Amino acid sequence: DGGITQSPKYLFRKEGQNVTLSCEQNLNHDAMYWYRQDPGQGLRLIYYSQIVNDFQKGDIAEGYSVSREKKESFPLTVTSAQKNPTAFYLCASSAPGQAAPQHFGDGTRLSIL
Amino acid sequence: GQQVMQIPQYQHVQEGEDFTTYCNSSTTLSNIQWYKQRPGGHPVFLIQLVKSGEVKKQKRLTFQFGEAKKNSSLHITATQTTDVGTYFCAGSDGNNRLAFGKGNQVVVIP
Protein backbone atom coordinates (compact mmCIF):
# COMPACT_ATOMS: atom_id res chain seq x y z
CA ASP A 1 0.00 0.00 0.00
CA GLY A 2 1.24 3.50 -0.80
CA GLY A 3 1.40 5.94 2.02
CA ILE A 4 3.37 8.08 4.42
CA THR A 5 5.15 6.62 7.41
CA GLN A 6 6.12 8.71 10.38
CA SER A 7 8.21 7.36 13.19
CA PRO A 8 8.23 7.12 16.07
CA LYS A 9 4.61 7.59 17.11
CA TYR A 10 5.63 8.97 20.49
CA LEU A 11 8.91 10.69 21.30
CA PHE A 12 10.33 12.12 24.48
CA ARG A 13 13.09 14.67 24.62
CA LYS A 14 15.18 16.03 27.41
CA GLU A 15 15.81 19.74 27.70
CA GLY A 16 18.68 20.85 25.46
CA GLN A 17 18.57 17.84 23.16
CA ASN A 18 18.04 17.81 19.42
CA VAL A 19 15.66 15.15 18.12
CA THR A 20 14.87 14.01 14.58
CA LEU A 21 11.44 12.94 13.38
CA SER A 22 11.31 10.59 10.43
CA CYS A 23 8.95 10.87 7.44
CA GLU A 24 9.04 8.48 4.50
CA GLN A 25 6.61 8.29 1.57
CA ASN A 26 6.22 5.79 -1.26
CA LEU A 27 3.61 7.77 -3.18
CA ASN A 28 6.22 9.16 -5.59
CA HIS A 29 5.20 12.67 -4.56
CA ASP A 30 7.54 15.56 -5.28
CA ALA A 31 6.29 17.86 -2.52
CA MET A 32 6.55 17.19 1.20
CA TYR A 33 5.53 19.24 4.22
CA TRP A 34 5.92 19.41 7.98
CA TYR A 35 3.17 20.81 10.18
CA ARG A 36 2.86 21.38 13.87
CA GLN A 37 -0.53 20.93 15.53
CA ASP A 38 -1.36 22.38 18.94
CA PRO A 39 -4.83 22.27 20.54
CA GLY A 40 -7.02 24.97 19.07
CA GLN A 41 -4.30 26.15 16.67
CA GLY A 42 -4.98 24.07 13.61
CA LEU A 43 -2.06 23.13 11.39
CA ARG A 44 0.91 25.47 11.16
CA LEU A 45 3.48 24.98 8.42
CA ILE A 46 7.08 24.50 9.58
CA TYR A 47 8.95 23.65 6.37
CA TYR A 48 8.09 22.42 2.93
CA SER A 49 9.97 20.99 -0.01
CA GLN A 50 8.78 20.95 -3.59
CA ILE A 51 11.71 18.99 -4.99
CA VAL A 52 14.73 17.03 -3.85
CA ASN A 53 17.59 19.13 -2.45
CA ASP A 54 15.36 22.16 -2.05
CA PHE A 55 13.17 23.34 0.82
CA GLN A 56 11.59 26.55 2.11
CA LYS A 57 10.68 27.89 5.52
CA GLY A 58 7.05 27.92 6.49
CA ASP A 59 5.36 30.13 9.05
CA ILE A 60 7.06 28.77 12.18
CA ALA A 61 10.50 27.53 11.07
CA GLU A 62 12.51 28.92 13.99
CA GLY A 63 14.08 26.14 16.04
CA TYR A 64 13.59 23.52 13.33
CA SER A 65 15.70 22.19 10.46
CA VAL A 66 15.04 19.80 7.57
CA SER A 67 16.83 18.03 4.75
CA ARG A 68 15.59 16.56 1.48
CA GLU A 69 18.36 14.35 0.13
CA LYS A 70 15.94 11.76 -1.28
CA LYS A 71 12.53 12.11 -2.84
CA GLU A 72 11.06 9.62 -0.38
CA SER A 73 12.41 11.17 2.81
CA PHE A 74 11.95 14.50 4.59
CA PRO A 75 13.25 14.31 8.17
CA LEU A 76 12.57 17.12 10.64
CA THR A 77 15.01 18.00 13.41
CA VAL A 78 13.67 19.80 16.45
CA THR A 79 16.64 21.66 17.87
CA SER A 80 17.29 22.86 21.38
CA ALA A 81 16.55 26.36 20.09
CA GLN A 82 12.84 25.46 19.87
CA LYS A 83 11.62 26.63 23.26
CA ASN A 84 8.22 24.97 23.22
CA PRO A 85 8.59 21.75 21.22
CA THR A 86 5.79 19.74 22.86
CA ALA A 87 3.27 19.22 20.08
CA PHE A 88 1.83 16.82 17.54
CA TYR A 89 3.92 16.83 14.33
CA LEU A 90 2.39 15.87 11.01
CA CYS A 91 4.19 15.13 7.78
CA ALA A 92 2.38 15.34 4.44
CA SER A 93 3.11 14.91 0.78
CA SER A 94 1.43 15.90 -2.45
CA ALA A 95 1.78 15.62 -6.19
CA PRO A 96 3.25 18.66 -7.94
CA GLY A 97 0.89 21.42 -8.94
CA GLN A 98 -0.95 24.30 -7.46
CA ALA A 99 -1.86 23.30 -3.94
CA ALA A 100 -2.57 19.66 -4.75
CA PRO A 101 -4.39 17.66 -2.06
CA GLN A 102 -2.09 16.55 0.72
CA HIS A 103 -1.73 13.07 2.17
CA PHE A 104 -0.79 12.94 5.84
CA GLY A 105 1.12 10.48 7.97
CA ASP A 106 -0.14 9.31 11.36
CA GLY A 107 1.94 11.92 13.18
CA THR A 108 4.55 11.96 15.94
CA ARG A 109 3.69 13.24 19.39
CA LEU A 110 6.74 14.90 20.95
CA SER A 111 6.92 15.57 24.68
CA ILE A 112 9.57 17.16 26.87
CA LEU A 113 10.78 15.23 29.92
CA GLY B 1 0.49 35.99 5.20
CA GLN B 2 -2.61 34.38 3.89
CA GLN B 3 -5.16 33.51 6.57
CA VAL B 4 -8.22 31.34 6.55
CA MET B 5 -10.76 31.69 9.35
CA GLN B 6 -13.22 29.00 10.38
CA ILE B 7 -16.41 29.41 12.35
CA PRO B 8 -17.55 28.05 14.64
CA GLN B 9 -14.53 26.56 16.39
CA TYR B 10 -16.66 24.03 18.29
CA GLN B 11 -20.07 22.48 17.66
CA HIS B 12 -22.20 20.04 19.57
CA VAL B 13 -24.70 18.41 17.24
CA GLN B 14 -27.55 16.10 18.09
CA GLU B 15 -27.47 12.87 16.15
CA GLY B 16 -29.88 13.13 13.21
CA GLU B 17 -29.70 16.91 12.93
CA ASP B 18 -27.95 18.99 10.27
CA PHE B 19 -25.08 21.39 10.75
CA THR B 20 -22.89 23.75 8.74
CA THR B 21 -19.32 24.90 9.19
CA TYR B 22 -17.90 27.97 7.48
CA CYS B 23 -14.56 29.07 6.12
CA ASN B 24 -13.60 32.65 5.22
CA SER B 25 -10.57 34.27 3.63
CA SER B 26 -9.65 37.93 3.31
CA THR B 27 -8.07 37.25 -0.08
CA THR B 28 -9.35 35.55 -3.20
CA LEU B 29 -8.50 31.87 -3.26
CA SER B 30 -7.52 29.82 -6.29
CA ASN B 31 -8.96 26.74 -4.63
CA ILE B 32 -10.17 25.48 -1.30
CA GLN B 33 -9.84 22.04 0.23
CA TRP B 34 -11.62 20.35 3.11
CA TYR B 35 -10.10 17.77 5.42
CA LYS B 36 -11.46 15.70 8.30
CA GLN B 37 -9.43 14.61 11.31
CA ARG B 38 -10.93 11.95 13.55
CA PRO B 39 -10.01 12.06 17.26
CA GLY B 40 -6.48 10.68 17.62
CA GLY B 41 -6.02 10.51 13.86
CA HIS B 42 -4.54 12.54 11.06
CA PRO B 43 -6.25 14.88 8.55
CA VAL B 44 -7.79 13.11 5.59
CA PHE B 45 -8.55 14.94 2.36
CA LEU B 46 -12.27 15.18 1.57
CA ILE B 47 -12.65 17.42 -1.45
CA GLN B 48 -11.27 20.32 -3.48
CA LEU B 49 -13.29 23.19 -4.94
CA VAL B 50 -11.87 25.33 -7.71
CA LYS B 51 -14.64 27.17 -9.55
CA SER B 52 -16.58 30.20 -8.36
CA GLY B 53 -19.95 29.12 -6.97
CA GLU B 54 -19.04 25.45 -7.22
CA VAL B 55 -21.13 22.94 -5.25
CA LYS B 56 -20.09 19.34 -4.71
CA LYS B 57 -21.84 16.58 -2.81
CA GLN B 58 -20.55 13.45 -1.12
CA LYS B 59 -23.50 11.50 0.24
CA ARG B 60 -24.67 13.58 3.26
CA LEU B 61 -21.95 16.22 2.81
CA THR B 62 -22.42 19.31 0.62
CA PHE B 63 -19.48 21.59 -0.09
CA GLN B 64 -19.83 25.06 -1.55
CA PHE B 65 -17.32 27.63 -2.83
CA GLY B 66 -18.50 31.24 -2.77
CA GLU B 67 -19.03 33.34 -5.87
CA ALA B 68 -16.18 35.65 -4.90
CA LYS B 69 -13.96 32.65 -4.05
CA LYS B 70 -13.36 34.03 -0.56
CA ASN B 71 -15.55 31.70 1.44
CA SER B 72 -16.70 28.14 1.60
CA SER B 73 -19.07 26.00 3.59
CA LEU B 74 -19.57 22.36 4.49
CA HIS B 75 -23.11 21.23 5.31
CA ILE B 76 -23.79 17.80 6.79
CA THR B 77 -27.30 16.38 6.95
CA ALA B 78 -28.67 13.72 9.29
CA THR B 79 -25.56 13.74 11.46
CA GLN B 80 -24.22 10.34 12.51
CA THR B 81 -21.79 9.44 15.29
CA THR B 82 -19.20 8.73 12.61
CA ASP B 83 -19.22 12.44 11.73
CA VAL B 84 -17.38 13.27 14.95
CA GLY B 85 -14.02 14.95 14.42
CA THR B 86 -12.41 18.21 13.39
CA TYR B 87 -13.12 19.62 9.96
CA PHE B 88 -10.43 21.82 8.43
CA CYS B 89 -10.59 24.02 5.40
CA ALA B 90 -7.39 24.96 3.61
CA GLY B 91 -7.03 27.62 0.97
CA SER B 92 -4.45 28.48 -1.64
CA ASP B 93 -4.00 31.90 -3.19
CA GLY B 94 -2.09 30.59 -6.20
CA ASN B 95 1.24 29.50 -4.77
CA ASN B 96 1.99 25.94 -3.76
CA ARG B 97 1.19 26.48 -0.10
CA LEU B 98 -2.02 25.75 1.68
CA ALA B 99 -3.17 27.88 4.60
CA PHE B 100 -5.19 25.79 7.04
CA GLY B 101 -7.93 27.16 9.22
CA LYS B 102 -7.96 26.32 12.93
CA GLY B 103 -10.67 23.75 12.40
CA ASN B 104 -14.21 23.13 13.59
CA GLN B 105 -14.34 20.45 16.27
CA VAL B 106 -17.63 18.58 16.07
CA VAL B 107 -19.04 16.50 18.89
CA VAL B 108 -22.07 14.34 18.14
CA ILE B 109 -24.59 13.76 20.92
CA PRO B 110 -26.28 10.36 20.60
Image (cartoon, coloured by chain):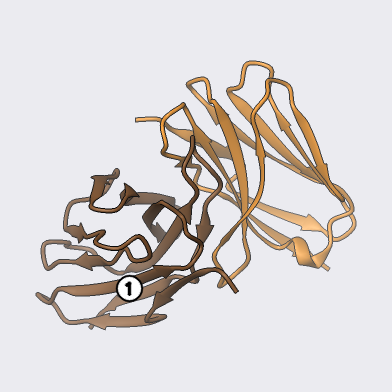
Chain colours: A brown, B orange
Q: In the rendered view, does B103 fall on the left or right side of A10?
A: right
Q: Residue at x 53, y 68 (%)?
A: A3
Which chain letter goes with mark 1?
A
Return the residue nearer the eye: A2 or B85: A2
- Residue named by callout 1: A22
Q: Position of residue B35 (x, y in %)?
A: 61, 51
Q: In the rendered view, does A44 fall on the left or right side of B43?
A: left
Return the residue nearer the eye: B87 or A30: A30
Return the residue nearer the eye: A95 or B88: A95
Quadrant position of the C terminus of chain A in the picture = bottom left
Q: Residue at x 68, y 20 (%)?
A: B52
Q: Position of residue A2 (x, y in %)?
A: 56, 69
Quadrant position of the N terminus of chain A in the picture = bottom right
Q: Secondary structure at mark 1?
A: strand
Return the residue nearer the eye: A108 or A23: A23
Image: B29 above or below B5: above
Q: Residue at x 60, y 41 (%)?
A: B33
Image: A91 above or below B48: below
> Would you identify the image quadrant in which residue B23 lies?
top right
> Would you identify the image quadrant in which residue B6 lies?
top right
Q: Residue at x 48, y 22 (%)?
A: B26
Amino acid carrying mark 1 in the image = Ser
Tell me if mark 1 has few (under 14), some (14-19) or many (20+) residues whose alpha carbon lies within 10 angstroms of its own: some
> Would you identify the image quadrant in which residue A58 lies?
top left
